[in-house]
Image (cartoon, rainbow, N blue to C red):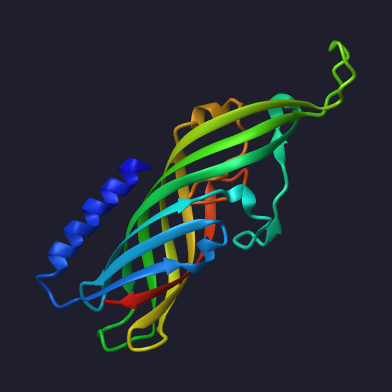
Amino acid sequence: MKKIIFITFILLLTISGLSAQTKKEHYIGIDLIELTTTTVNLNYSCNLNARFTPFVQVGYTIDYTKVGFDILNFSSKTPCDDIIYNGKREFKEQKGGYLKLGLYYNLRKSVEKQNFFHIGAFITGSVAQESFDRIATVFYTLLPFNEPYLRHPDNKLTNSLGIGVSIGYEFKLSDRIKMNIDYQLSYSFRDDDKWSANRRYDPFGFMPGIHYKETDSKIFPLAILAVKYRL
């Protein structure tokens, strides 16, 4: 996480230095929906011209297990399956950070047009720290006690790299405030892919900035509702 913060700080300094030499529009903003996952975030973007807007975003999830209802997936959270223990995996803590770099292509011909559609492409580096209990539901007759549920504490550190695209709409709220509504699809490369293929850790799930809830798919949808302020 320290590396993510350091890299982001250097990038922001570089972008600020370059942008100081121009008269382009610069924005800072936050993703409102991500706040519901206990993820604090901040993004910076700059309109190079009417067509292109590069952006950088950094975020940190404090603890996703504190979320009772996942707005991003429109469902309540439940323990996920655990093949190795023939039972469930109950998370105690899920935290981590991410750094996202990308570029929007704006579907407009002039900067005077304030409401317009855009498409985006991006790359996201994500680090997740998870602590959980593996809960076996098999009755263990060989144990010296009659315990139908066996809990085994475990933890995991996962590094992920996601590439993706998005489509959305940007519109003006006031002279300085604008809003983006986007639908994002990402594909993830994780450092435990081989482990997952061997059925040791089945679902793909908590990857801050890429995806949050457990799923068997490697294509991850994400809704974005961002508000930004012109500097």
Classify 144 as above or below 62: above
Q: Give the image location of residue 115, x and y in percent.
A: 38, 85
Q: Quadrant of the N terminus?
A: top left
In the displayed orientation, state which residue is furthest to the left. 21
Closer-to-camera residue (134/75): 134
Looking at the image, residue 35 sits to the left or right of residue 213; the answer is left
Looking at the image, residue 171 sits to the left or right of residue 67; the answer is left
Residue 111 in which image quadrant: bottom left
Classify 32 as above or below 3: below
Classify 219 as above or below 26: above
Q: Give the image location of residue 38, x and y in percent.
A: 54, 56
Closer-to-camera residue (223/76): 76
Q: Give the image location of residue 192, x and y in percent.
A: 49, 31
Residue 230 in which image quadrant: bottom left
Q: Give the image location of residue 93, x and y in percent.
A: 59, 41
Looking at the image, residue 133 sits to the left or right of residue 208; the answer is right
Closer-to-camera residue (165/138): 138
Q: Residue at x 49, y 33 (%)?
A: 157
Can you see residue 196? no
Can you see residue 175? yes
Q: Residue at x 27, y 89 (%)?
A: 112
Q: Residue at x 58, y 46 (%)?
A: 217
Looking at the image, residue 61 sits to the left or right of residue 150; the answer is left
Q: Quadrant of the C terminus?
A: bottom left
